[in-house]
Image (cartoon, coloured by chain):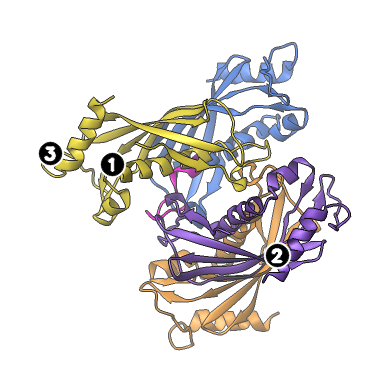
Chain colours: A blue, B purple, C yellow, D orange
Amino acid sequence: MKPYIHFVQYYETDKMGITHHSNYIRFMEEARLDFFKQIGFDYLEFEKLGIISPVVGLNNIKYRKPTTVGDEIAIEIKITKYTGVSLTVHYTMKKGEVLVLEGDSEHCFLSKEGRILVISEKNFPEFHAKMNSLLLSE
Amino acid sequence: MKPYIHFVQYYETDKMGITHHSNYIRFMEEARLDFFKQIGFDYLEFEKLGIISPVVGLNNIKYRKPTTVGDEIAIEIKITKYTGVSLTVHYTMKKGEVLVLEGDSEHCFLSKEGRILVISEKNFPEFHAKMNSLLLSE
Amino acid sequence: MKPYIHFVQYYETDKMGITHHSNYIRFMEEARLDFFKQIGFDYLEFEKLGIISPVVGLNNIKYRKPTTVGDEIAIEIKITKYTGVSLTVHYTMKKGEVLVLEGDSEHCFLSKEGRILVISEKNFPEFHAKMNSLLLSE
Amino acid sequence: MKPYIHFVQYYETDKMGITHHSNYIRFMEEARLDFFKQIGFDYLEFEKLGIISPVVGLNNIKYRKPTTVGDEIAIEIKITKYTGVSLTVHYTMKKGEVLVLEGDSEHCFLSKEGRILVISEKNFPEFHAKMNSLLLSE
């Protein structure tokens, strides 16, 4: 799995001269969509089928070191929890060898009408198996 | 007509210590929606009816003076062109007596399916009359 | 203490039709700066003196209900931890009676040169006393 | 000269399901910094030397076709005016063969203290010559 690279942009800095902390939440989303595409589950295709997976929580977001425009942030993702009802994604962001941010996002699954979806081997066998295999590989 | 007030936020600044230039395009949108609501045409209601009015152009955007977090920007709007097919909105942004930005946005009208709508006294008599009266009042 | 009000803007929505989850982190910042100003400690004044208080963590961010453009979000703030070295701020966001988001941000104090500041009754007696009194009032 | 590529992100869409129009102003900045780096004048190095080149105007921004998350936008840049006092940059954005946006940004040159800089063969001979040669090559 290739880490996702985000190049920090000028407009992502703030008057402290560093990347505004809110933008890392966006980088998490970029990396997450890239990760799911890499493992064969393009989120945008799911969305077209009427399945969405909104962020329901952010936890243990730790800002370790600042970054700024021109910096290259490498983002690695692990699936740390999966129940079929919810999914927890862990992020590690590095600039070279320097740890920049760690944190987790939590997701549920919803139908287009906003009803909670329980993913299982019956309705989404391939996705279900993949999530479970990723959990085991940690 | 009351000018629209935008209070500049910390996250709207960049590493120069001033409001990032892209954000003024967002303030124009804020002021425009407020303006249409004030004159009795809530854009969000139009959208629910399936009529949208996207930005098709930005012209003569002149950044006169910088602003920063904590500043209060007063935005005045005039309708400077209206043909039923397109609409031009002019913005004047001030911080106290200081001119901060001037500029224009150009809009068309579309149906939800993306077809061009021609507004006239036949299909939208009240909106059509209002736009024409605003033009005359300049 | 008046809750801080954020009016959701069109540009804050995403293709799901709701406020993008990253924007709430920005609303937290808006509310936090407003809160400190209301209690007599304008963050921007501190920054001019060379004291900054960056976000070092986000915890227990729970997205309860979505919002969208036109919605009015009322944000209440409590100081839930203060040691002189770090500060934890708790946020409750509501749309009318509906709970929209809860969560915490954690902050440290730094000098302009990036050195850790320990706030005490010796160097910042008024701020120190205020933080402790806010903790007790919970 | 390689065109700059921007991959549209989820958080760059709005409730219309398309890239919010304000974001293209940010893509222009991304492409501009990349362009200057490619021709050997890294803007961030200039900034360290105390020379900044803020956006003073946006002109003839024409939104031709919408884009959305997952789209790849190729941005080409030309220098269309240069006087030593001001600089005009022209942008052409394409998604495959489809023209997405055209437009211009105008810039001046300032010292860190905010004084207007006149670039000439005397103070910045290499940059001055490069800008003039780019103009001639059109």
* Crowd around label 3: few <14 · some 14–19 · many ≥20 (10 Å): few
Q: Nearer the viewer, residue D63 or A126?
A: D63
Vertical comparison of B17 with A23: above or below: below
Part of the protein shown in magenta = A13-25
Marks 2, 3: nearer the viewer: 2
Q: Which residue is mark 3?
A: C121
Q: Is residue B56 visible?
A: yes
Q: Is residue D49 left or right of residue C134?
A: right
Query: Do discs 2 and 1 belong to a common subunit?
Result: no
Residue type, numbered disc 2: Leu
Q: Which residue is mark 1?
A: C39
Residue B41 lies, in percent from the top left, at 70, 50
The chain carrying label 3 is: C
User: How far separated are the C-alphas under marks 1 and 3?
Assistant: 18 Å
Q: Is residue A70 visible?
A: no
Q: Which residue is mark 2?
A: B134
Residue D11 lies, in percent from the top left, at 61, 43
Q: Nearer the viewer, residue C77 or D34?
A: C77
Residue D134 lies, in percent from the top left, at 63, 79
Q: Nearer the viewer, residue D20 or A76?
A: D20
Q: Earlier in the sequence, mark 1 or mark 3?
A: 1
Marks 1, 3: nearer the viewer: 1
Q: Nearer the viewer, residue B105 or D40?
A: B105
**Marks 3 and 1: in contact by CB < 8 Å?**
no
Is the magenta region chiefly helix, strand or loop?
A: loop
